Amino acid sequence: MSLTVLNVAYPFAGVGPNAVGGAEQVLTALDTALMKGGHRSIVLASEDSIVAGTHWRMPKEVGTIDRHVRSRFWVLYREAIEEIRRRFNVDLVHLHGIDFHAYCPQDGATLVTLHLPIAWYPEDSLRYTRPGLWMNCVSTSQARAAPEGIRLLPPIVNGVDVDALSYRHARRNFALFLGRICPEKGVHVAIEAARSAEVPLLIAGKVFPYKAHQQYFEARIEPQLGSGCRYIGALDFARKRRFLASAGCLLLPSLAEETSSLVAMEAMACGTPVIAFRRGALSEIISHGRTGFLVEDAAEMAEAILIADEIDPDLCRSEARARFPSEAMCAAYLERYRDLALHRAAAE
C-alpha cells in the first residue's frame, strides 16, 4: 500500500540532516524512510529545510519569536495544510510541533507525536478529540505522565542512524554539553560540574531567538566562558559526530522531565559515555554503570566525570545498535501510518 504522508514541522525550526532539535531529526528520518519505501513524502517546513520528498516551503522567522509572530505563522500553517490536502490525496497528516493545536486539521487521519514534556502542552490541546485524530509519545515515562482520556497510542521510541555515527576518534580529555542553550537544559550545571572536576568543557548548541533563551545565555553562560570552558555554537552532523566521538563524556544535566534524548543515543553510538540527571526518559536510555551514569546533582556529576573512562566504548556502541536504531523507529511509524490510513479509508 503506497501512502501520501504530510509531515508538518514546528514552524520555527528547520528540518534536514543538520537539524538541531530532536523532533526535527525524527521528522527528517521519517521523510527519508517514506521515500525509500516508495511512498510520497510531503514536508511542510521552513524554507531553510532540506528534505528528501516534496518540500512545501514556509518563510523562516529571523527575528525574536513572540506571541504576535506565532499567531501570524499559525494562520500561514493552517492555510498551507488545507492547500496541500486539496492538491494531493493525503492519506495522513503527522504533526510534530508543540503548537499543533493551532493548525491541526479539522478532519482526516491525523497523528500528533508529543516530542516534549507533557506538562508543556496546554491540557485543552491534549484533550482535543475527533474521529481520526491520534497521539503518541516517544517514551514510557512520558506516556505515564499523560492525562487520562486522551487518544493516546503506544509510544514509539526514538532512534538514531547508528551506522553513520559508528565513528572512531582519539579520545581527548574534555567533557561535552550538546543541546539547546536554555535554562531547562541545565548548561550552567554542566559548567559547575566540569569546573569542579577540573576537566575542560565544550558547549555546543543553538541559542534560539526566544527572549528567555537569549537572556539566559547572556546572563548565565557567556560570563563563565574562557579558560576551561568554551562555546563552539551549533554543529552540523559531521562536526557533531566528531566532537561526540572524541569527548571523554557527554553531560546532560537536564532540569526538565526529558521525553527522550537523541543526543544521548548518538553519544552511545559513538562509544561515548553519558552522564545525566535522572530525569524522565534519561533513566530509560542510559544504563547506569554500563553506558554512563545517572546522577542527582552537580557534585555527583563531577565525580562521574572523573570515572567516565571506566565505561566500555564498545558496550555503548552495541547497546545503541540493539536498542535505538533509526530503522526500528521508522518501521514502527510506517506501520502506524498504514493502520491509521486504513482506519480513515474504512470510515469513508
Image: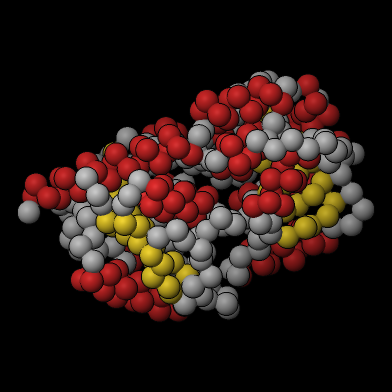
Q: Is residue 86 above or below residue 108?
A: below
Q: Residue at x 61, y 65 (%)?
A: 208
Task: Let me know if residue 205 appears in the view.
Answer: no
Q: Is residue 118 above or below residue 303?
A: below
- Please give left or right for residue 152 compared with residue 250 in the image: left
Given residues 30 and 179, the one toward you in this image is 30
Q: Residue at x 75, y 52 (%)?
A: 203
Quadrant occupied by the C terminus: bottom left
Given residues 11 and 281, the one toward you in this image is 11
Q: Residue at x 78, y 28 (%)?
A: 308
Task: Let me know if residue 81 appears in the view.
Answer: yes
- Please give left or right for residue 240 compared with residue 201 in the image: left
Q: Residue 185: x percent and y percent?
A: 63, 49
Q: Residue 196: x percent and y percent?
A: 86, 39
Q: Is residue 97 above or below residue 61?
A: above
Q: Residue 275: x percent and y percent?
A: 69, 33
Q: Quadrant of residue 234?
A: bottom right
Q: Residue at x 69, y 45 (%)?
A: 241
